[in-house]
Image: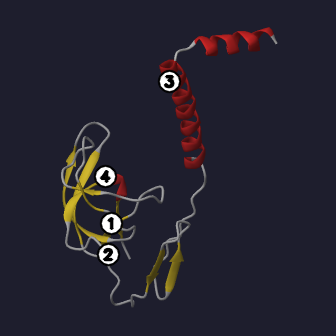
Amino acid sequence: MNKIHRIIDWYRRLNMIKKISFWGSIGSIISAIALFYSSASVSERQTSYGEKSPNIHSNGDVNINYNSSQERSSYNYIEHPDGGGTLLIATPSLTNPKVICHPESGSKVEFLREKKENSFMVWVQVKVLSGTCQGKTGWIGKDNYRTHNS
């Protein structure tokens, strides 16, 4: 009980700025815990290709591929590895990225070139061929770039 009184006395002696900083720190810690807890949850994704193969993803996206066997081929598309969103940006940099568009998962793209920014970040320049960003050109992280071979 003596420790609790010391903590209360310590808190009462803090000025308003330090009290705000204290509660801001507590909020940041709680937010970080919530972020790691939510990112640790399992994400279900289905991928199947072929005649009349609907896919319903856990984020609510629905993909239906009604390609006939004559139309099947290799193509490139965007898909975030964790099921989240992807940004199409103007320049290959994480510093102040200028967002061009938010392409949907599954949007087909044309590969233009690749650029390695540093030892861990590789960018791919693409032209979006389908979806709401169709016709736009920009950069995405290579981990969001996929190739489908059928």
- Which of label 1 and label 4 is nearer to you? 1
Q: Is residue 20 above or below residue 41?
A: above
- Which of label 3 and label 1 is nearer to you? 3
The label on residue 141 is: 4
Between disc 2 and disc 4, whose residue precedes?
2
Please tell me which residue is depicted at 75% across the width and 12% down the height of the picture: 5
Look at the numbered disc 3 and give the secondary structure of its residue: helix
The span from disc 3 to disc 2 (Cα, nearest Å) is: 45 Å
Q: Please give the residue where the numbered disc 1 appears in the rendered image.
A: 103
**26 and 95: which is toward the camera:** 26
The label on residue 131 is: 2
- Which of label 4 and label 3 is nearer to you? 3
Q: Do the residues bearing badges 2 and 1 touch, measured as CB atoms within 8 Å?
A: yes
The label on residue 26 is: none
Q: Do the residues bearing badges 2 and 4 touch, measured as CB atoms within 8 Å?
A: no
Between disc 4 and disc 3, whose residue precedes?
3
